[in-house]
Image (cartoon, grey):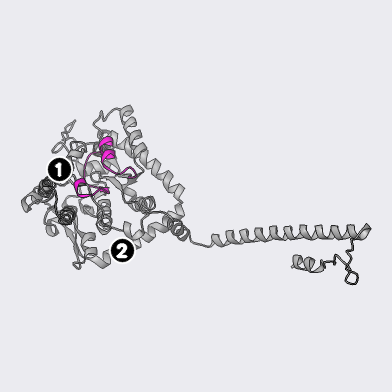
Amino acid sequence: MVCSLVLLGDTIEPSESPQSGVSVKPSGPVGMFRHFRRALVTCMVFVCLFLLGVLLLTTRSRLQMYVPQALLAANASDSCVPRRNIVFLKTHKCASSTVMNIFLRYGTEHGLNFVLPRSRYTHYIGHPELFSRRLVVDVSPYNMTYNILTHHTRYDDEEMHALMPPDSLYVTIAGLSVRVALLILPPRQNVQEEPDDVRVEPKLDWLPVPTPRDWERIGLNQMSFDLGFDGPFNSEQAVAKFVKKIASVFHLVMLADRLDESLILLKHLLCWNTSDMAALKINSRYSAFKEHLSNETKEQLLRLNSADWQLYQYFAKVFDDKVKAFGVDRMAVEVKELRDKQKEYYDRCVMTEGSTEKLSPYYKRKDVIAFKSKDKSKFCRTLTVTELEFHEEVKKIQEAKIKQYIASHKRPSSSSSSLFKRVAKEVTSGTSSSQSRASHAR
């Protein structure tokens, strides 16, 4: 308003006489006054523009104070591109089957390709052998490239980076070493007993040290072993060097005991949606089968799994720092959103919940949870299916892609036809081989 009054008061003087047409140049005090007035008006205009800019910035800042942080985050994520090349290093007994289900669902929905084992008799890629390209099906002759590696394997830096696209994100998950060890170690009780009868304190005096790994695959310091570490497990310096290497390669190490927060961090790392991250607890154990531990037993398990404990402590600190940087309040809002979506999916798709012994054709365990879907829709089926069943489905999908590629080429070379037959044989397994895999699943 002040600027408007000043501008209106600045009447422009004619530069020539209307009567004579002769230019009149002001001089003396009158001319100086006119120049001064014009300079003053110019200054006032700049001052008004400056104040207007400050007012706009201040108003914008105040408005942002009332906008939910989750909405701001969503708007910020609109500019990012969803990531589709991913290595998820699956670790035993760390909620990794739930995370694997998330990747399998997303990958099949978007037509992505998975790294699958060459062997017909297992869903593992190697293990205890380290990951190697020779252990997987070669799909390059069919104009296919790998997008997601999420099956059980042991980490090998050189081989994985040689196979996967250079922009791949590397993710894994760690769990409290005490709980992981308790789930890994051979059970003292018969799991056929009723749940109420197995809530007892385990005694570890029977445990031989060192403990041989079941099938050379399952044993103490399991997380470190899955991540490619062969020891010495009791060397603090060697473990520290190993942990530092993992930290330099993996973009995110999630925590099983803080799974929902982990999935939020993963969501933003991948630039996915909350609906992509919602999942059921696949391959989880009934709480009635989880034994109670005394402090003495916990200390004993920590000593036996010192490498895993060192690994967990390091990444728990890193995880805390990531949550603080993300924003504690913002995390709480997004975790609630995720849990609401999980409940929505459960109510929509789960007819009943029972043991895999009753509900799974492959995985016969009385202490492990399985779900029966309400309907046969793809959405509900992939949400509730067991890990081994989903593995079989993915194999069929990729076999169909190979067949489609060959069919689209009128004259495939004899070498391509031969290779297809070999690959098709490798990725197709019968019922007996599926049952064999199930007996070795952990």
Residue wearing tag 2: 343
Q: Is residue 142 magenta?
A: yes
SS at circle 1: loop
Please tell me whether mark 1 or mark 2 is closer to you in this view: 2
State left or right for residue 243 relative to residue 17.
Answer: left
Query: Where are the magenta residues, as a range?
Result: 140-168
State left or right for residue 73 relative to residue 299.
Answer: right
Q: Is residue 228 or residue 392 the one in the foreground?
A: 392
The residue located at (24%, 54%) in the rendering is: 104
User: Where residue 351 appears, x then y in whole percent?
Assistant: 20, 66
Q: Amino acid at mark 2?
A: Lys
User: Where residue 213 appears, x then y in whole percent?
Assistant: 16, 36
SS at circle 2: helix
Q: CA distance from mark 1 to mark 2?
A: 35 Å
Q: Is residue 367 or residue 236 the one in the foreground?
A: 236
Q: Residue furthest left?
A: 432
Numbered label attached to residue 188: 1
The residue located at (38%, 57%) in the rendering is: 335
User: Where residue 368 appears, x then y in whole percent?
Assistant: 18, 53
Seen in the picture, residue 314 relative to 349 is either above or below; the reply is above
The residue located at (34%, 34%) in the rendering is: 245
Q: How many marks?
A: 2
Query: Which badge, 1 or 2, is on the more N-terminal residue?
Result: 1
Q: Residue furthest bottom?
A: 19
